[in-house]
Image: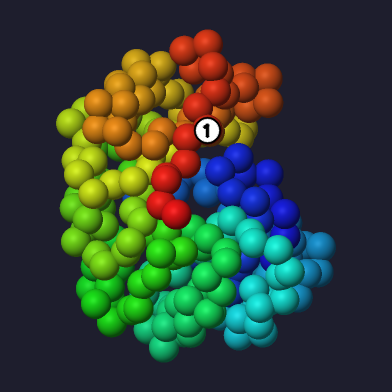
């Protein structure tokens, strides 16, 4: 585990690593680039770079945290990747259930498998389940998420590479929006962001604006409508 610079979480925990591209949002995957750098540095966990790997030794880690944490699960992978067996997913879920003092944020692009396995998993209030929704082509992921047994559901619209009008927000607790960063970031239109923020406000859904992105994301900042949006779900 490690402290995270991601604005909407406190730390990351990676019981699995590695992934494969599945949609347009994956084009400039930050995790893939980071995995290759860690491999070059000789980090054992990333000896296979971005190939999907399970790390059973990581399952003990959350039991050792002394204070409540907000944790992004698998920032370097996708727990619902087809190469991650259900038996291991269930072990990860058991760890999360055993530690109700922590909030675990799980995010996937593989919503079909999430829905398929949802009824075989035991959900508790501290397991937040989200799907990535980068443009209109993948909005079906929201429908899949809505049908799961997750107690808290969220959308990560990052990198936002297209408009998302008429979002289906019924049963959704939280929406995160962010622009793409890196060497060749695809542009994000301010009107796309404003529209999502307005939809969330009308639906009374917590809205978190992460970043404008761009080649210098720090300089671009995260101010929208003259303020920052750091809303979180009210679930406790």
Residue at horizontal 38%, vertical 43%? 174
Quadrant that contains the C terminus: bottom left
For residue 76, say whether it is visible. no
Residue at horizontal 57%, vertical 67%? 101
Residue at horizontal 29%, vertical 33%? 204
Residue 59 image point, x, y percent: 61, 81
Residue at horizontal 48%, vertical 76%? 97
Neighbor class of circle 1 (other Cα within 10 Å; few <14, some 14-19, many 20+) is: few
Residue 235 image point, x, y percent: 41, 52
User: Which quadrant of the figure has residue 90?
Assistant: bottom left
Frontmost residue, 176 versus 67? 67
Quadrant that contains the N terminus: bottom right
Residue 34 image point, x, y percent: 67, 54
Residue 23 image point, x, y percent: 35, 50
For residue 232, say whether it is visible. yes
Tag 1 residue: 230
Mark 1 lies on a secondary structure that is loop
Q: How is the image coloured?
A: rainbow
Q: Is residue 51 above or below residue 202?
A: below
Frontmost residue, 48 versus 203? 203
Farthest residue to the front: give it. Answer: 236
Farthest residue to the top: give it. Answer: 226
């Amino acid at each position: 585990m490690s402290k995270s610079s991601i604005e909407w979480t406190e730390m990351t925990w990676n019981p699995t690593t590695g992934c494969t591209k599945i949609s347009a949002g994956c084009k400039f995957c930050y995790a893939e680039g980071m995995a290759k750098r860690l491999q070059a540095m000789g980090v054992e966990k990333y000896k296979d770079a971005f190939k999907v790997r399970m790390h059973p030794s990581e399952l003990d880690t959350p039991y050792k945290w002394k204070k409540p944490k907000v944790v992004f699960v698998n920032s370097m992978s996708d727990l619902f990747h087809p190469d991650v067996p259900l038996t291991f997913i269930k072990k990860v879920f058991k760890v999360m259930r055993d530690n109700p003092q922590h909030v675990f944020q799980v995010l996937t692009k593989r919503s079909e498998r999430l829905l398929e396995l949802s009824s075989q998993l035991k959900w508790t209030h501290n397991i937040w389940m989200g799907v990535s929704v980068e443009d209109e082509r993948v909005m079906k992921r929201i429908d899949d998420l809505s049908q799961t047994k997750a107690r808290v559901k969220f959308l990560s619209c990052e990198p936002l590479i297209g408009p998302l009008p008429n979002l289906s927000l019924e049963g959704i607790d939280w929406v995160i929006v962010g622009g793409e960063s890196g060497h060749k970031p695809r542009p994000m239109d301010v009107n796309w962001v404003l529209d999502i923020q307005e939809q969330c406000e009308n639906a009374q859904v917590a809205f978190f604006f992460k970043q404008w992105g761009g080649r210098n994301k720090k300089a671009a900042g995260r101010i929208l409508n003259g303020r920052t949006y750091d809303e979180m779900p009210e679930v406790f």
